[in-house]
Image (spheres, grey):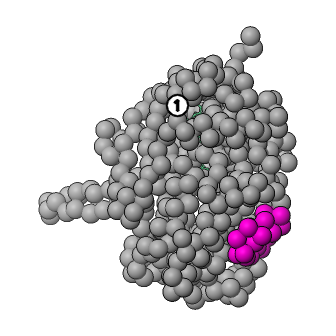
Amino acid sequence: MNLEKSQSKKIFVLGGDGFCGWPTSLHLSNIGHDVVIIDNLSRRNIDNELEAGSLTPIQPMGTRLEAWEENTGKKIGFYNIDIAEDYDQFLQVIQSEQPDAIVHFAEQRSAPYSMKSPKHKRYTVNNNLNATHNVLCAIVDSGLDIHLVHLGTMGVYGYGTAGMKIPEGYLDVEVQTESGDRVEQQILYPTNPGSVYHMTKSQDQLLFQYYNKNDSVRITDLHQGIVWGTNTEETKMDERLINRFDYDGDYGTVLNRFLMQAAVGYPITVHGTGGQTRAFIHIQDTVRCVELAIANAPAREERVMIFNQMTETHRVNDLAQLVSKLTGGEIAYVSNPRKEAAKNDLHVKNDLFLSKGLNPTTLDNGLLQEVTEVAGKYAHRADHSKIPATSTWTKEQKPGVPEAK
Ligand code: NAD
Ligand code: USQ
């Protein structure tokens, strides 16, 4: 598909080397947008720090961009800038490139990594809050009318709502005035973060609300669920375009970890009894949602637009059972290294994306098989010592390590 020339935009993808940012950059470029990636490659440095890496053989940025041009004839630009630190350089690039939209993925996104030590907590807060604030400040400083699309998280809501469907960002409340009248208003849904990482995402919301109110910055905040899957139509075009696949105890997310564990013959590590219910979305839908968010920008005086970017909810234990049935993998119920409710129900509204034309990709055996096949193909690259979740939320908790047989 190619956009009409009039719909084509110059788009910055901050964090465009990451798990969500890379396939999004390719997708936006493929449909006809002019894409520029900004990334300081900090995620690759964290791999070095943790002595872990993507299960799939991701290529250096230069090779990735060359392969994209070879396959499609399209060019994607790249700047290596730390947006949390190098404000002047970032502003200069905005002024010279004049983007219509900025998609902001550039944060430290792992909850376990954010809980590893005081150093990791402080890094996550410094990096994420400064990155988001610098983006907002630079948009205003540039004087340009740039639409900001931010990747937020379902985790800002907390995961228990006493049976109510989580609304898209705003909660209707009724308050009593001094004269006794009942007045209705809408407030940001109260946050209830479960890690230092999720707390930074809660703080991001206030930065957006403020800059939207004060400077009329046009902002869309996408409260995304846990992303699963590996490849998209674009990353499948050439092995050099392959997306990253995190499986280690800090960065691997639950469903991809289960599929990978089954593929490499490691027990499927359910934390506690697996009663936690979470929201999920496939990576192919992530890239489509960002496309839709860009095409449906809010008007200048409109408040921050918040979408719940998820397509289904599942209980962790049900996912483990499903993967075990599909692959024959055994399940290990391990100590939960996190401080979280042992069991919760979760109901979420996602009407906004459905109304804009999202056709959800839901958990289906074919797709699960596809991820298992990717994991199986690169199983020889797995370092089994990096699989257990060793980062604990408090000093009293134990890591999620399966018992030795
Ligand atoms: P990722 O770690 O793979 O990618 C993030 C990218 O941002 C990396 O390439 C990193 O180098 C870059 N980055 C980080 N700090 C930077 C800085 N200061 N300056 C420049 N670049 C910087 O993470 P991801 O899984 O692609 O997640 C992207 C975003 O989506 C995150 O903000 C995350 O909170 C959100 N999200 C992810 C998931 C998920 O399941 N992966 C779910 C919900 C929301
Ligand atoms: N879990 C297991 N076994 C494992 C790994 C995880 O049982 O081997 C459990 C966890 O205890 C937790 C649930 O699975 O209850 C989800 O954990 P996760 O690591 O898949 O997801 P989370 O830490 O919430 O973070 C991920 C992304 C983050 C994003 C978030 C979306 O890393 O960037 O914001 O998903 S959401 O969960 O909707 O907030």
Residue 23 vertical position relative to residue 379 in the rendered view, above or below:
below
Of residues 122 and 57, the one drawn nearer to the viewer in this rendering: 57
Tell me if residue 71 comes above or below residue 319 in the rendering: below
- Say which quadrant the C terminus sits in: top right
Local secondary structure at mark 1: helix
Name which residue lies at 73% across and 67% down: 71
Is 257 in the magenta? no
Which image quadrant shows ligand 2?
A: top right
Crowding near pointer 1: few (<14 within 10 Å), some, many (20+)?
some
| Residue visible at 77% across and 70% down in the picture | 70
Residue name at image x 65 percent, y 36 percent:
372
91 shown above or below 360: below
Report whether residue 218 is seen: yes
Residue 302, percent from left and from top: 38, 76
Image check: 404 left or right of 30?
right
The quadrant of the rendering that contains the N terminus is: bottom right
Stretch in magenta = 61-81
Q: Position of residue 126 (x, y in %)?
A: 69, 59
Q: Residue furthest top?
A: 405
Q: Dot 1 corresponds to which residue?
A: 319
Question: Label 1 sits on what residue type?
Answer: Leu
